[in-house]
Amino acid sequence: MTTTTVADRFSIRRTASLTRWNTVLLSRNRLAFVYAVVLPLLPLALLFTGERGSASVGAGAIATMFLTIALFPVYYNVLAQFVSRRDELVLKRMRTGETRDAELLASIALPGAVSAVVLSAVAIPISAALGQPLPVNPLLYAAVAVLAVVMFTALAYWTAAWTKNAEAAQLTSMPIIILASIGPLASSIPDMSDRLRDILSLTPGAAMADLVRIGWFGFDGPAAKQATLSFAETWGQAAQPLLVMAAWTAVAIVIGRRSMRWEPRS
Amino acid sequence: MRVRGLRRTYGHGPSAYEAVRGVDLDVPTGSITALLGTNGAGKTSTLEVLEGLAPATDGEVSVLGLDPIADRDAIRRRTGVLLQRSGFSGDLTVRETLRLWSATLTNPRPVDEMLELLSLRERADVRMLALSGGETRRVDLASTLMASPELVILDEPTTGLDPESRRAVWRLVSDLRDGGATVLITTHYLEEAETLADRLEIMHAGRIVRSGTPTEIAEGHPSTISFANAPDVPGDLAGVGRVLHEYGRTTLETDALQSSLSGLLAWASLNQVELDELDARSPSLESVFLSIADGRDAAATPTDTIAPLIPSLPEGILR
């Protein structure tokens, strides 16, 4: 009797090679390259315009940068790459060979994921140079970066189920972009009711922004402007937004798997 | 490859469409089998099940003794598949495309060897989007054959190729068989099927309606005598069955080609009739194929292919 191991089902060598070629393709598409590398750094310009050293300004800039990273190098990039490869029948062709489905999915997601993680790390010395504090809980901050990549990659594959091609992605991506943006944007409204704020905190973007404010700046609530949480206290404060992100990730993976299509609708 | 009672249905409920309706198929090891059929006959739907790209709705399918879905990974290491439409990223060059493909294989042949084999060396550094349809098809073939597969499935491999390239592909496919590989090929070119295939399977309306060698398939079908003008030929020529007048030509179908031809020439000579562009042919694959395609071969046209189109007709009318 033969047994199938994970190594049989997923080849790191093949995934790395496919990722390399997907990166080459990304670098040859100027718009995708700007989305993946340049655009996410723009929110850091807020650190120049706001009060130097203000943690409140820093939290706004970093949370916005995180949202941009999640939406462009990860979410939109993965969605556009996947649907255009599917539309060109590249995915169908690859599936006739030895490449496994999981390797194809990972290799499309990895260039954006690497870009997102690197940009999240690069933001720390840039912010420090502009007078911002170092993260209170670097572990939580790193976990948020990884979880954001996983969540928005899953949301991208879910969105791909109802997206015909790369052009259509400009429209079909809107619900997730709005869902991700509405929480962080609405949090700046001062007179919002607590009930509405609680509801918005369940959106993926709000949970991600809350985790950035907790993990990096040690803020204990949406109205906080000063660090009050210690390293240990940040874990307790982070439990709810971490659960929200995990729930969105799980939902996207389950529905995305069920609705996954590898070739254009005939 | 062994298939029994294969069915494949698209969609559900009242709008469901059954593209494959109970196909039985055997592809002997070390042979070339051609799957022929009109557009929409169900060839590609059948191949996609054999390739493990789609599940069968019903029936048994065995490829290299394995299940194409459950044992997909094991089968793909030993199989080369060419889809009906190529799928490559336009922004990679030919060489990059083959290097990418090579990196996904366990035991690939060198990229340069494949470039040479498919006459692509001079186009190696050209981006895929700048290639002609025929060149893209050759890159596709290079990918298909790179793993030295023991089973090769080719869906219309020569579509879009010029006559010279087509013959080069024929040589390549013959060499595969001579090297011990098993080949299943679909094609619209009947000459290609007759030249290459050891065995033919003709599909129509989701079923295989004729199987055998080219000679066996043509057996029992009439020979034809045709000419360009339409003189009033006598109806009692030996062996002549139907007389057709199509596209400015008169065609006589006969079961006794030599006798009918002798009788026709004797009549023409006696009556001083010039038979322009006279042509006499033994039964051909083309005539069999056309008789199936246009519905003249009643045995190959199941009544239930008509029924869904005119559901309100009383059942007896279709008999």
Image (cartoon, coloured by chain):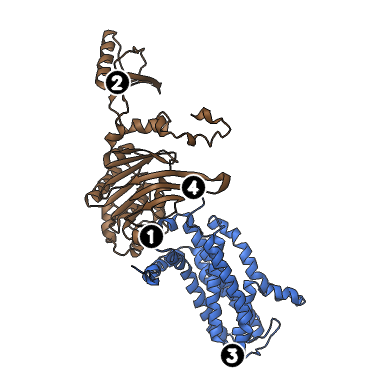
Chain colours: A blue, B brown
Q: The N terminus of chain A is located in which quarter?
A: bottom left
Query: Which mark is first along the chain, 2 or 1?
Result: 1
Question: What residue is shown with label 1?
Answer: B72
Disc 2 packing (10 Å; few <14; some 14–19; many ≥20): some
Q: What element carries label 1?
A: helix
Ranked by sequence position, the earlier of labels 4 and 1 is 4
Q: Mark 3 points at which residue?
A: A231
Identify the residue at image location x=33%, y=37%: B190
Mark 1 nearby-residue class (10 Å; few <14, some 14–19, many ≥20)? many
Secondary structure under tag 2 reads loop
Q: Mark 2 points at which residue?
A: B278
Asked if the residues shown at circle 1 and circle 3 are in contact, with their CB atoms under 8 angstroms apart, the answer is no
Q: Distance of mark 2 from mark 4, alpha carbons?
A: 47 Å
Residue type indicated by callout 4: Thr
The residue most toward the top is: B271
Verify CB contact (< 8 Å) between mark 2 and mark 3.
no
Residue tagged 4: B9
Q: Quadrant of residue B255?
A: top left
Confirm or deny contact between disc 3 and disc 4 (CB under 8 A).
no
